[in-house]
Structures are given as structure tokens and as C-alpha cells.
């Protein structure tokens, strides 16, 4: 069976190599901080990393055809937990609910992922509630903080995570015609930002 290697991710080859090394050695940190500008693919890398860790064809590269990969592609995998803000903040009750679930074994996966994005929208109470879990990490759970502005995070939280720094994409990342170079320049290398543009406006700006 042909293996698909992080096929939806553009660029970030060094970071992907590091993550694949974690899988190969079985020595993944208990908490990661994906830090970098919005729109460069941090959350996408987290999703692909989950698939690679939990692929039923064997960890390393997601096959995109096993039950685990298909569930993740459909957004229904019970062991991939995404915590994002409600009413503009990530509140302490929401963090506590997720933390309580990490005390249980994963439903299906080898490793449960808890992804908090954007992590800087936790208030101090939420961040401190998470801190104890970072200090005493549960088994079979990986916590990934996705942050567009890591300077806003508590230093005590940052110090307990391994930091992976994501940079804007450049022409070398997008070689081979995978990405329109005009759009790359338009978004300053943060292609995810296109989701926030009006489609007609994007096409008009590209033409100009």
C-alpha cells in the first residue's frame, strides 16, 4: 500500500522530520508548543501528526485509508480533542473538562491529542488549571498548544512545553506549482489567511 507522507502540509519539512523522529524513537514530549504566525499550517500539522502517530497501518506516516485516518479526516475521531475559544476566551471550566478526560484511557488511539488553539486566549485561571497537568502529564496523552502569539502565554506554561517554531512559507516551500506565487506574496507566506478574505476580493487583488 502506498503511504502518504503528510501530503496536505506545505513546507515545514524540518519540523515534520522532527515529529517523525519522535514517532520513530517513541520518545515524544508530553507537551508541544506550536508557535508562529496565524495561517502557516500549525493546526494542520497537529492533525497530520495525530494521524501519523495513530495510523493502524503502523505509526510514522498516515495511510489515509485505515479506520483511524478516515475518522480523523472526517473530523470525528474521539481521541483528537480540539479546544478553541467560546465568546473570545478559553475558560477555566472548558480546560477542566478536557483535563478530566485525560485521566481516562484513549477510546481507540494509541495516543490521545489535546490541541488548544489559539492557546493565548486562555486567561490566567485557565492557564493555571492546565499547568498542573503539564507538570504531571497523563499517560497516552499529548498536549499541543497552538499559539499565534506565544509571548502572551504564561512563562510557566511555555517552560513545560517543547517549542516548535513555524515560519511563514517562502517560494522554496511552494516550489513545483503547488501554490500560486502571487497568492503567496499577497498573504506574506501565511496562506491560511486566505480563509478570512472575500473570494472576489482575493481574485481582484491577485489580478492587480
Image (cartoon, helix red, strand yellow):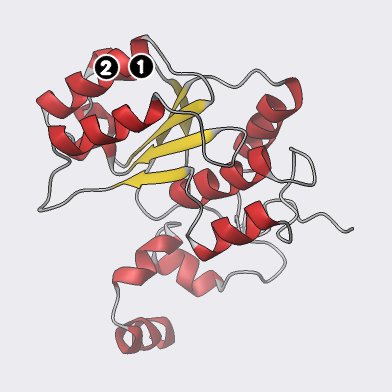
Helix, strand or loop at label 1? It is helix
* The image quarter in which residue 124 lies: top left
Quadrant housing residue 138: top left
Q: Residue at x 35, y 84 (%)?
A: 199
| Identity of the residue drawn at 15% across and 35% down | 93
Where is residue 150, by image quadrant? top left
> Residue 49's spot in the image, x, y percent?
59, 42
**What residue is rendered at 27% in x and 37% in y?**
119
Residue 132 in the figure: left or right of residue 112: left
Q: Which residue is mark 1?
A: 134
Residue 148's x, y, as percent? 31, 42
* Label 1 Cα crowd, 10 Å radius (few <14 / some 14-19 / many 20+): many
Relative to residue 3, is residue 45 drawn left or right? left
In this figure, what is the number of numbered marks? Answer: 2
How far apart are the alpha carbons under marks 2 and 1? 5 Å
Q: Secondary structure at mark 2?
A: helix
In this view, the residue farthest toward the right is 1
Question: Badge 2 local density, few (<14 within 10 Å), some, or many (20+)?
Answer: some
Q: Position of residue 47 (x, y in %)?
A: 53, 49
Between 22 and 91, the residue placed more toward the observer is 91
Q: Quadrant of the C terminus?
A: bottom left
- The answer, for residue 172, to whether it is visible in the render is no
Q: Which residue is mark 2?
A: 131
Please name the residue shown 74% across and 38% down the image.
59
Residues under numbered marks 2 and 1 in contact, where contact means CB atoms less than 8 Å apart: yes
* Nearer the observer, 142 or 146: 142
Residue 105 appears in the picture as rendered: yes
Say if 108 sits above or below 142 in the image: below
In this rendered view, identify the residue nearer to me: 68 or 200.
68
Q: Position of residue 1 (x, y in %)?
A: 89, 58
Q: Which mark is residue 146?
A: none
Amino acid at each position: 500500500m502506498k503511504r502518504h507522507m503528510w501530503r496536505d502540509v506545505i513546507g515545514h519539512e524540518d519540523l515534520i522530520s522532527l515529529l517523525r523522529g519522535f514517532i520513530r524513537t517513541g520518545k515524544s514530549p508530553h507537551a508541544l508548543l506550536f508557535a508562529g504566525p496565524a495561517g502557516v499550517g500549525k493546526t494542520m500539522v497537529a492533525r497530520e501528526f495525530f494521524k501519523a502517530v495513530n495510523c493502524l497501518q503502523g505509526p510514522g506516516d498516515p495511510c489515509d485509508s485505515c479506520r483511524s485516518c478516515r475518522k480523523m479526516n472526517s473530523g470525528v475521531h474521539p481521541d483528537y480533542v480540539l479546544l478553541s475559544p467560546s465568546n473570545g476566551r478559553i475558560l477555566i471550566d472548558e480546560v477542566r473538562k478536557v483535563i478530566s478526560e485525560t485521566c481516562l484511557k484513549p477510546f481507540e488511539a494509541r495516543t490521545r491529542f489535546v490541541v488548544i488553539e489559539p492557546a493565548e486566549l486562555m486567561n490566567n485561571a485557565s492557564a493555571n488549571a492546565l499547568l498542573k497537568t503539564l507538570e504531571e502529564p497523563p499517560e497516552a496523552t499529548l498536549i499541543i498548544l497552538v499559539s499565534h502569539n506565544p509571548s502572551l502565554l504564561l512563562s510557566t506554561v511555555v517552560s513545560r512545553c517543547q517549542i516548535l517554531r513555524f515560519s511563514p512559507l517562502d517560494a522554496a516551500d511552494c516550489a513545483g506549482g503547488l501554490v500560486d506565487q502571487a497568492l503567496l506574496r499577497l498573504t506574506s507566506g501565511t496562506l491560511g489567511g486566505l480563509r478570512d478574505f472575500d473570494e472576489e476580493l482575493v481574485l481582484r487583488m491577485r489580478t492587480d
